[in-house]
Amino acid sequence: MSKVQTGLRYSEEHEWLDTGAAPAKVGVSAVAADALGDVVYLDLPEVGSELTAGTTCGEIESTKSVSDLYSPVTGTVVEVNQEAVDNPALVNEDPYGAGWLFTVEVTSEGPLLSPEEYASKNGGEL
């Protein structure tokens, strides 16, 4: 069973959001990383891009498939995790740590789930 990190909020599309610091940090859940298999490529939004909650903002490619990334918030991209772009396996190895994807200066949030709600819907464990 995949780990669901407490202290974060989650989108229906498996992105996590950490608003504990500004700018907010975004990544994909361990549930998604485990389902994808070995992540081999990331196409992330560019710094300065304006994102809209619930819309696609990039792609994540694994040995199994290519999936869209969805922004959990509306706002401006402040930073992209170049280490994850250079080494996409970080998404599998440490999805809530070194495998984060990008940071956003948030103007509004989309609909988000608590860790408990996300775990219940997706078979994860807290």
Image: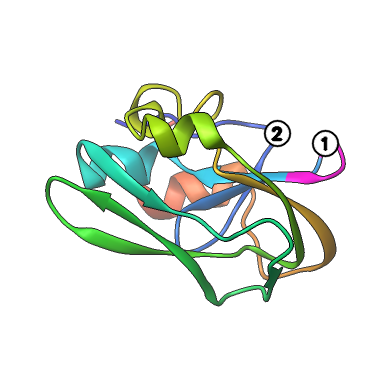
Q: Which label is found at residue 20?
A: 1
Q: Which label is found at residue 107?
A: none
The residue at the point 24 percent across, 45 percent down is 35
x, y (%) of residue 104?
Answer: 75, 54
Circle 2 residue: 7
Residue 23 inside the magenta-drawn segment:
yes
Q: Nearer the viewer, residue 125 or 46?
A: 46
Q: Magenta residues, as a range?
A: 20-24
Tell me where residue 30 sits by quadrant.
top left
Q: Are marks 2 and 1 in contact (CB under 8 Å)?
A: yes
10 Å crowding of disc 2: few (<14), some (14-19), many (20+): few
x, y (%) of residue 80?
Answer: 61, 44
Tell me where residue 100 sits by quadrant.
top right
Q: Nearer the viewer, mark 2 or mark 1?
A: 1
What amino acid does circle 1 point to? Gly
10 Å crowding of disc 1: few (<14), some (14-19), many (20+): few
Check the image and report above or below for 122 versus 48: above
The residue at the point 63 percent across, 31 percent down is 6
How is this picture coloured?
rainbow
x, y (%) of residue 52?
Answer: 67, 76
Tell me where residue 125 sits by quadrant.
top left
Give the Cα separation between the discs numbered 2 and 1: 8 Å
Disc 2 element: loop
